[in-house]
Amino acid sequence: MASELCKTISEAKLERHKNLFLNYRNLHNFPLELLKDEGLQYLERLYMKRNSLTTLPENLAQKLPNLVELYLHSNNIVVVPEAIGSLVKLQFLDLSDNALEIVCPEIGRLRSLRHLRLANNQLKYLPAGEGIRAVTNGSGLKLNLYVYLRCTLQFCDLKKRLMQVNFRAEWAGGLLSSVLYSAKHTLCLTNKKS
């Protein structure tokens, strides 16, 4: 498996691939071959779904500077490094179905981000202050906060954070309705207008 992985990555480097598919490879660590030398400077889309990754490398943005889409769903990622905020071209980030408990505030530095998927994690709260404000106020951002709440999520904290951010009223109301709908069976909440 390791030699096949090395061959796939070497070929992608040599041929300057824009897309790289490393799904379903039972990877427990981020492949160092992706980060060697210059990395994959031309890579725009990296698919690493359904592996067993627990973390991401700190030098990800340095070695893969042109990433536009990063698919990391269905792994075991607990922490996203602060360096994620340096992926300045990133428009789509899928971190759903991982083990995240918090979203690092550095995600707020992703000014090109249009889609952020966080479904089925163990989120307890969203970043305070500038982190979430920057994400939600991004130009044309459609924040796909597919947060299917679990019992560990503190709804009061989520609602408070959403209300602290200066959203358009209809967007905030729609998101809260979705959150309440997703949570009604686990948290027994009702949709009250605030």
Image: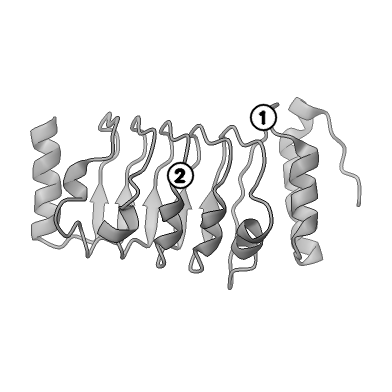
Labels in figure, total: 2
Q: In the rendered view, does 55 fall on the left or right side of 170?
A: left
Residue 118 placement: quadrant: top right
- In front: mark 2 or mark 1? 2
The residue beneath circle 1 is 150
Determine the residue located farthest toward the right in the rendered image: 193
Q: Position of residue 8 (x, y in %)?
A: 13, 45
Other residues around mark 2 within 10 Å, as few (<14) / some (14–19) / many (≥20): many
Who comes first in sequence, dot 2 or dot 1? 2
**Residue at 15%, 48% in the rendered image:** 9
Quarter assignment of residue 154:
top right
**Residue at numbered disc 2:** 80
Tell me the kind of residue under disc 2. Val
Q: Position of residue 167 (x, y in %)?
A: 75, 64
Q: Is residue 64 visible?
A: no
Q: Is residue 156 visible?
A: yes
Q: 10 Å neighbourhood of mark 1: few (<14), some, or many (≥20)? A: some
Which type of secondary structure does the marked residue at label 2 adopt?
Answer: loop
3D distance between C-alphas at marks 2 and 1 = 20 Å
The residue positioned farthest toward the bottom in the image shown? 139
Amino acid type, label 1: Arg
Q: Is residue 38 left or right of residue 145?
A: left
Residue at horizontal 41 percent and vertical 62 percent from the top: 86
Q: Is 159 located above or below residue 142 in the figure? A: above
Which percent across, then down, holds residue 23?
Answer: 29, 39
Q: Quadrant of the N terminus?
A: top left
The circle drawn on residue 56 is none
Q: Vertically, is 133 above or below 52? A: below
Residue 193, image x, y percentages: 91, 51
